[in-house]
Image (cartoon, rainbow, N blue to C red):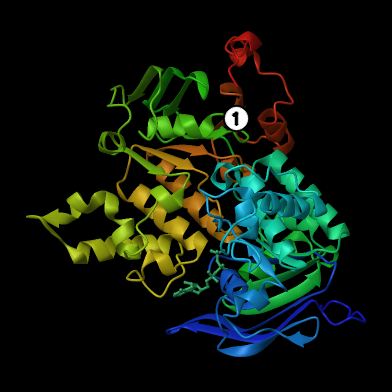
Amino acid sequence: MMQEPTAAPPLLEAVGLVKRYGSNTALDGVNLTVHTGRTHALVGRNGAGKSTLVSLITGLNAADEGQIRFNGQDAPAPGNLHEWRKHVACVYQKSTIVPSLSVAENLLINRQDFGNGWIDWQRVYRTAQDILDEWDIPVDVRAEAGSLDVENRQLMEIARSLSYGARFIILDEPTAMLDGRAIKRLFARMEKLHEQGVTFLFISHHLSEVYDICQDVTVYRDARHIITAPVAELDKRGLIEAMTGEKYAEREYHPRKLDGETTLQVNQLNRNGAYHNVSFAVRRGEMVGLAGGGGCGKIAVAETLVGLQTADAGEILLKGKPYPAGSVKAALAAGIGFVPQDRHHEGFVPDMSIAENATLSILERLSRWGFISRKRQNKLAQQWFDALDIKAYGIDQPVSGLSGGNQQKVVQARAMANNPDLLVMMSPTAGVDIKSKETLLDYVAKSSENGTSVLIVSDEPDDLRACDRVLVMYHGRITHEFPIGWQDQQLIAAMEGLTEAQPAFAATTAPEEHTP
Ligand SMILES: Nc1ncnc2c1ncn2[C@@H]1O[C@H](COP(=O)(O)OP(=O)(O)OP(=O)(O)O)[C@@H](O)[C@H]1O
């Protein structure tokens, strides 16, 4: 189903784009047509080619074949970024700002009329303020850009793109690092900019967002264009089937009988300003969710368990024994595996291969007399590669060349390779496509059946559905516990603090004790 042609030429028309990396074809003759004023979603599984397409339609890379036109005119020559910026810009998940400079400097960086010789700072701030005012973007021009949170950093990058003249903005997984309220604010801002004549290409693995804010959707699968349709004509089931190429089946979740010994026991854990009186246990083979909105303290609790942070008071026992606090090494040695929140900093070594990264945590086990057995390493890595459905040309590929979601899977493999007693996963499916999410979470569920205890720390209902119990944190305290089978609305209301703490937790949630 193609979009009805309108009188004006499309804002973007990409036809027959091919891009190869060595023997790997990242895009195999794909099309994309975006019309002015229609928010267009681009979706596809990890490695489908979305980021590669963005690199071509923003002029960062040259296509091997195909044409790109903006408003009926041929696109500038690849690499002439000054000209491309007038047509299109992309706000990436990873920031492109200079953190040590002010918002104003970031907005006006690299402009011919600023920064040559003597700088008139009053003029810099005034011009930057004018840009933000024109688009009604409430960011302080004098703030250090590195101090902005993700939400404001994205707004600043949008304003910068618009100031170059672009009226076509690509948002690459903009909601991946935002909590529910910030996502609502972002969507409201997009609506407003849309009214001011800005068109968005929206890339997201959260399909409900596609239905919330997009009018058209394009699906790529395995480097190919599968379908473009108005979202109103393609329901969620159809969309998932287009993405996966398989029939979609609804899942059911059932309670399990769990009576194994306690693997993790957390007693009255406190960290000033982060979490308070946190107590819970995870049994052998149990999957527990730790949910909550941004700033609720769930990540701080998880990072304390794995040694990335320390508590001010309280007790953590693994199989009945304490282990040294504040040391990742000690946590790993005690039997904890973890998927960190920030995979770019703590997750993987980019220049090392999939095999090397996936087996980082067990190098000792793979070595004999100080030499690593490559055969054993590769065998194990290959098992993970297949089990997690990693899309790459092989286990020797450096992780830096993988798509975002596939990098996440390598981090996951590393966390599980050690066969830990307790697996702590923070936002484990951020950037992971819907099918891979299922594969990954199924794998975790299978490990739990074999005795691994699991703590999934996330605000994403889909990550938590298979958990035997979900604990919800709000303002640093556990306020609710839901057994498997909860409804999304229940969980979201608790995460947003819209429902009173349950009686079992109310005693620890007295408002006067609250430290934001
Ligand atoms: N610089 C590169 N070198 C080698 N291969 C690459 C490079 N960039 C991308 N690829 C490959 O091209 C394919 C498409 O990757 P791309 O990053 O475009 O996927 P994506 O749809 O954005 O995925 P994700 O949702 O995981 O971000 C993948 O197989 C990837 O490994």
Residue in front for this viewpoint, 132 or 180: 132
Q: Which residue is mark 1?
A: 483
Q: Quadrant of residue 449?
A: top left
Q: Is residue 298 left or right of residue 220?
A: left
Q: Quadrant of the C terminus?
A: top right
Quadrant of the rendering where the N terminus is positioned: bottom right
Q: Amino acid at mark 1?
A: Pro
Picture coordinates of residue 90, whole percent (x, y): 64, 65
Callout 1 crowding tier (Cα within 10 Å): few <14, some 14–19, many ≥20:
some
- As drawn, the residue found furthest toward the bottom would be 65
- How far across and how far down the image is residue 204, in percent? 65, 59
Residue located 40% across and 18% down the image: 312
Secondary structure at badge 1 equals: strand
Q: Is residue 320 above or below residue 507?
A: below
**At 39% from the left edge and 48% from the top edge, which residue is drawn?**
346
> Which image quarter: residue 286?
top left
Q: Find the residue positioned furthest to the front.
A: 118
Look at 80% across and 50% down and name the residue there: 133
With 18 as the anchor, is 235 left or right in this view?
right
**Res. 265 image quadrant:** top left
Residue 114 in the image: above or below residue 305: below
9 and 366: which is toward the camera: 9
Q: Is 442 left, or right, of 434 in this rendering?
A: left
